[in-house]
Every structure is written in C-alpha cells, then in structure tokens.
Image (cartoon, rainbow, N blue to C red):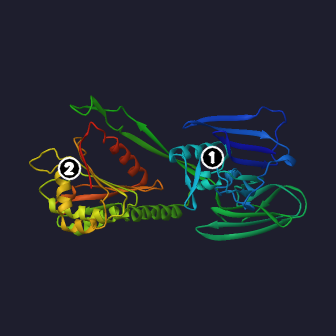
Amino acid sequence: MICDKIIYAGETILTIYHRGFVREKGAKRLCETLKVGRFNLCFKETVVDEKNINLPNEYTIKFEGLIDAKSNSNPYKEAACAYMEHYIVLDKPKRLFGFENGKFNLSTLPEHLQQINSFVEQYTGLKIAENPMFYGDTFVFTCHERNYRANKDAGIIVSSIKPNTTILVNFKKNGAVVSAKKIHIDEDAQEVYVDSGIDWTYLDIEIFEDDKLVYCDKDVSYIRHIFLNTAIGGTANHIKLKTLGGAFRLQDKSSEITSHIGDPIDEIEELLNDSNRNILRLLKESQDDNRTTFISPNEYEKAFKIIAEVMQSAKSELWVFDPYFSNIDGWNTELDFLRLLAHCDAKSKNIVFFAGNVAKAYDAAQVKTFVTQDIEIQKVLQGKNELGLNLYQSKAYIHDRFVITKDDNGSFSGIVIGASLNGIGRNYFCIVALKPKSAKTILEDLQACLDDNNIVAHERM
C-alpha cells in the first residue's frame, strides 16, 4: 500500500492511502517541497504495510462508496474508478482554518490556499479545490482500472475479466440510447467483445464483480476524427509611436489550412452539427451577462438604484473613489448619496476625492460642515456619536469611479462607474460589475495610494 501525505508548516494536512499499489520496499521515498508564504509545503510518498495504516482515532463521519472516473474526489481521474473510504474530522489544520461564529474560516491568504490546492492536485490527483474542507481528513482508495477500449467496427473490447462478472453498456448517439447490451462472464477471460450492432458516438458502462459494482462511467466518447488547423504566419509589421512606447508590433497576418484526419464524416450529419453549433453560439452571444448596464441622460433613478444596492450591501467596509465627488456643480446629487451613506450598515464608510480646484470643489472640511448641517443626516445622527464616514481628500488623481465593498469574511464586490456620481443623469456611460478578484485587486492598489504623501486632508464624521 502506498501512503501520500501533504504537510504544511510541519502539520499533516491531508493523508491518502492507495490500496493495491506496491513498490519495492526500501525504494527511495518520494518527496517534493514548495515554499508557500512563510512555510514549507511538502508531499511525501512512502510504502506502508496495510496492517499498520494510521487512521484517525476520532473521526466524526466515515463515508464510503464507489466514485466514478469523473468525480473530483477520484485521484486517478479517467484512468480508473475507485472505492473510497473517507474519514472526516472536525479538527482541521490550524494554519489553514480557524473556527468562529459557528463555522470554519480561512486563517491563511486565499492566494496561499490556491497554491496549496494546485500542489495537492499535482502530486496526489485529488481536486481538493472543489472542497477545501477535505483538509485534515484521511482517504483510503481502492483502484479499479479502466480496462476497455473502442473497437473500430461497432463496439468495445473489455479486458482482464474476472469470474462472475456482468457488463452493462448503453451505446448512445444524439442524446438517445441506440443499443443496450448486458453480458455475463462466468470464468476468467482475457478479452470480451461487446457488439453495439449500430453506429454510436458515446457510451455509459457499468461493470459488476460478484454482483458488486466496481466500475462505472458515463458519456465516454472516443476520437474518431480530428480537424487540424495550421496557421502559416508572415513577417510582423511595426508602427512607430510618439508617447506610447518606441514601437508597437502589429498582430501577425497568417493564412490557415484545415486538414481532416480520421474516419470519413457523414456530410448531412456534419451540416446539421455545424449549423447547430453556429446557432448556439449566436444565442449565447445574444444573452446579457448582467455585468454591464448602459445609462443614458435623465436615467437618474436607474443609475441610483444600481449604485445604492452596492452601497447598502456592505456590512464591513465601503469605499467610494470619485475625483469629482465634492464638485460644487452637482453638489445636491452628491448630498443625496451622502444621505444614503448615512443609512448604510457598513461599519466603515470611506470617500476618496480629488478637489484640486478650490474654485470648483469643496475641500474635506467644507464637505464635513455641509453634511453635519443637513437636516436629513441630522435625523440619522440622533442617538449616534458619528456616521462612521471618512473623507479623504487626495492629491493623487484617480480617474475612474469605483464603489467597492469588503466584508469580514474576506469577500469583495463592487462596480466601476463611467461618470462621476454628481453627473449620473447628465451623460452616457456604463456601470460595470466587478468580479470579486478584480474588486479585491483594485481596492488594494487604490488603498496603496492613500499614504501621507497623497492625502491632503482627512475628516471623520
């Protein structure tokens, strides 16, 4: 039996046993190491006696069953199915997780966990990124190899068959089962041919040994032909630039040649398949991804609703970056947003603005004065010491406008706005929803600008 261990910062964070695999005892141990953050991440593989495997003494749940070739829990991927024994523990690795408010939370950086996930998959085959709560657990896998191949005529050939084996195969095409076969083998057999009797493109298969399911897979297909696209490139051209670099290389102009390798293709079938793919592509491209909203002049309410939803969703931190937020022209619109911010639940609310021209924009102290004098905001302040609002007047000119939220659980969200908040009803512009990773990166980069060299004034209310 082979034992794989993943060790991080000296703590074993995953143990996997592979039953039925043997290497010569005394062979050199396999060991790989990667630096993740401040700690070493190690993979160690050793040969162990099955009688001496170290299972967790206090596991909470034991789950076992056959997992198919496409399961994320299958370390052998499509090469085999596996009978899995999964020992689940609640004592999770301390370097990875903490426990607070009734749930596990990350105690390491998400980027570090992603590195660890990739390392685990590379050396163990387990796609642990799909379920990080597997860390700390122990797995015992019994491998059942894939022992069948397609036959050029019309079926498949199954190899290395044990006595009392039953094979079930559904041959499929265009979403339908076109042939179903069941074969029982009483004695050892080197090969058995399962004849479909009809053309097929993919199959489902189940193999039973002594009435116990040992292998299953769905929608298995084989490469019958390949289209090979070959591009023949020419010499790349360059254009001279004045301010954007010395020269820019234009995209290569190339000619393509398509070659077909493999079985002949039915012309009618290919016509229908090509047409279907093209129509599906057009339908997909016509669908709105709901990430971009176009705003026209006078669509105040439409724009305000989208921005307000993001602001009100913040529970921990809310950041607004808008260079013209304190402009005198449009101040009433800005005051509307400040009234909204006064009602938002975020513990920390922050506005960063430029205010470079004192004739056209209020400074941070003036904004604070106007806010505290506003009747609607005074109602919110009743019974409160402050609004939790920070005003940062910056000399770093941040052109684009962002509203970004950060929550205690480490999640980020936000939008980028193509116009200043004081002009949302006067211009054509877009509001684009940011993906969490983009929101995080943008916020961290913008916060790096908020140092003593760039902050002209800071007021808190």
Task: Give how far across and how far down residue 227 sits, in percent.
Answer: 52, 49
Task: Give how far across and how far down residue 214 sits, in percent.
Answer: 78, 60
Task: Give how far across and how far down residue 365 sits, in percent.
Answer: 18, 50
Q: Which mark is residue 364?
A: 2
Q: Nearer the viewer, residue 225 or 437?
A: 437
Left or right, residue 49 beside residue 428: right
Residue at point 90%, 64% (across, down) = 186
**Residue type at the position of mark 2:** Ala
| Mark 1 neighbour class, 10 Å CA radius: few under 14, some 14 to 19, many 20 or more | some
> Relative to 431, is 15 above or below?
above
> Relative to 65, is 253 above or below?
above
Left or right, residue 207 beside residue 343: right
The answer to which image quadrant residue 43 occupies is top right
Q: Which residue is mark 1?
A: 121
The answer to which image quadrant residue 309 occupies is bottom left
Does residue 435 appear in this view? yes
Does residue 264 appear in this view? no
The answer to which image quadrant residue 239 occupies is top left
Left or right, residue 130 beside residue 137: left
**Residue type at the position of mark 1:** Glu
Camera-side mark, 1 or 2 = 2
Q: Nearer the viewer, residue 324 or 275?
A: 324
